[in-house]
Image (cartoon, rainbow, N blue to C red):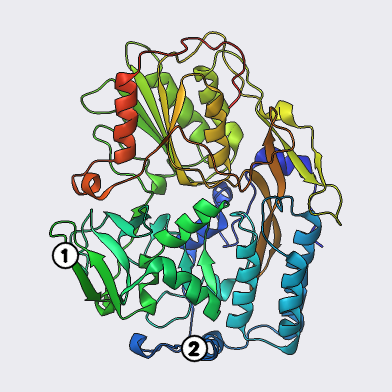
Amino acid sequence: MARIAPLSALILALALPVTGVASDDPDSSWLPSWFRAQIEAEPTLPAPRIAVPDRPTSRDEWAQLIDETWGEGRPTVDKLDFFHLFWDTIDQQFPCFQDLDVDWLALREAYRFEVARGVSRGRFAAIMSRLSLALMEAHTDALVKEVAWRTPFEPGIPLLRVGAWGWITEFGACLTPLPDGSLLVYRAPDDHPLALEPGDVVLGYEGRPWSQLYPELLDYGLPAAGFWGSSPETYEHAWLMAAGANWHLFETIDVLRHETGEVVSLETSPMASWGYRLWCTEQLDVPGVVVPDYFQQQIVSWGIIEGTRIGYIYGWGWGWNAEQEFRDAVTALLPPEVTDGLIIDFRFNLGGNLSLSNAGLALLFDHPAATIDFVTRCDPSDHLGLCEEGLFAQFVIPGDPGSFYDRPIAVLVGPGAVSSGDQVALRLKFHPNARFFGSSTNTSFNAPAVMHDETDYYAQYAVADAYLLTQPGEYLTHDPFPVDEAVWLTPDDVAAGRDSVVDAAVRWIRESTGGPRRAGGRVSP
């Protein structure tokens, strides 16, 4: 059984060392494990490849390929130990079973005897990913490192990618879902081998929508690697946006060309000899505003939108020097002679330590605002038996009596805001002048802990769930984050280089007639 101590320290930090990839840089321990794997993991797979047209067409054929690709792996006793460690820890300590349609006991019975009889490394990775996906929680997963972090996504490799935020190498173009489940190309290099351009739409593969294909491949037993959402909507979002990263499983890809309106079926083979890394955040460039330079450990940047008096702040995470950067951003944009309104963009935010937002938020609020507390499991035999931690005083937005932002604040959010990215967006719900644009954050409103981390296996889980003090008993993980204006990128806007979400926020700020000019007591979001 995994044990953590002291629990209160983990919850207060919300910045646990969940890296899973060895590093000599302790300052990067706040980064989530899936993101560190993108940046640092080196593929080591000495595995057979197959030609994509010869890929399996039945469950048995897929099972054979999965077995052959990764070999036997660790002894059965080690696999069983890891399986039981994850299942038991979740059963007794996981606090986010509410709103989940999952029979956790049935999953144990379905898989443990199979593992005990002996399974390959690839099959075991698939079993652990099924347990993880069933919990629909971004902090909670168990994986086989050789499969999830060290296998290249190359033609014929039976591995599914989920999520496509951050430093993406598999497809060389950034995709985001449209309402019909197709995928909008919002960023692509000029020399993409499929000639993809911003505004094009990926429909699927070989005449079938990706939204139908990925559940089928999961059902065939392919292991999954990556990062997913913590609500039904954001879970689906993560699977859809990964459509391009799974080209290695198909012979042709179907694309709607924005310029001509033509649907074309393109061979995927040119992708095999081409490599390109692209930074994908579901954001477009904003004239006059420089994006953060992640590779210089900058994750907050700011500026004024060209031709306006609207300040703009990017917040990509809460680690490194984010506390000072965010405070500097607010300080620069706070004076009424500088800005008429403010946009804070959290559509992509890697999380970290939410307290690093305090210094900047104190300038926006003129009085303290109590926000959340956490609950943990207090009955190991009851999945819904939760007890309050009584730490709410640690999560009060401090406020500064001598400072207040009395103009409109547009907050941009989306499924790429995770953990403290969720939490700091929620904190801005307490500002009377804030309005939210985009779509739900990830909804991983909880504190994570590492359960197991050694050479071959890695596991982490949510150890505490959050709730608003105004809504005790209503826990936030899995529940959609409400926005005031649901808006997302569109093909026409992207083709013209416009960010639809930013445009909606700018219109609101320009049309706003004021609203509350001073805070009048704590706001209930």
Per the image, label 2 sits on a secondary structure element best described as loop
- Quote the CA–CA distance across marks 2 and 1: 33 Å
Per the image, label 1 sits on a secondary structure element best described as loop
Residue drawn at x 51%, y 19% as measured from the top left: 432
Query: In this figure, which residue is indicated by the disc labeled 2?
Result: 58
- Residue 192 visible: yes
Q: Residues within 10 Å of mark 1 (few under 14, many from 20)?
A: few
Q: Quadrant of the N terminus?
A: bottom right
* Residue lying at the far front of the rendered structure: 180
Q: How many marks?
A: 2
Chain-order first, disc 2 or disc 1: 2
The spot of residue 369 in percent (x, y) is 63, 20
Residue drawn at x 66%, y 45% as measured from the top left: 446
Locate residue 125: give its quadrant: bottom right
Closest to the observer: 420 or 149? 420
Closest to the observer: 242 or 211? 211
What is the three-letter code of the residue carrying label 2? Ser
Closest to the observer: 102 or 390? 102
Closest to the observer: 386 or 181? 181
Query: In this figure, which residue is indicated by the disc labeled 1?
Result: 262
Q: Is residue 440 above or below residue 325?
A: below
Apparent side of residue 468 relative to residue 204 in the rendered image (left or right)? right
Locate residue 200: give its quadrant: bottom left
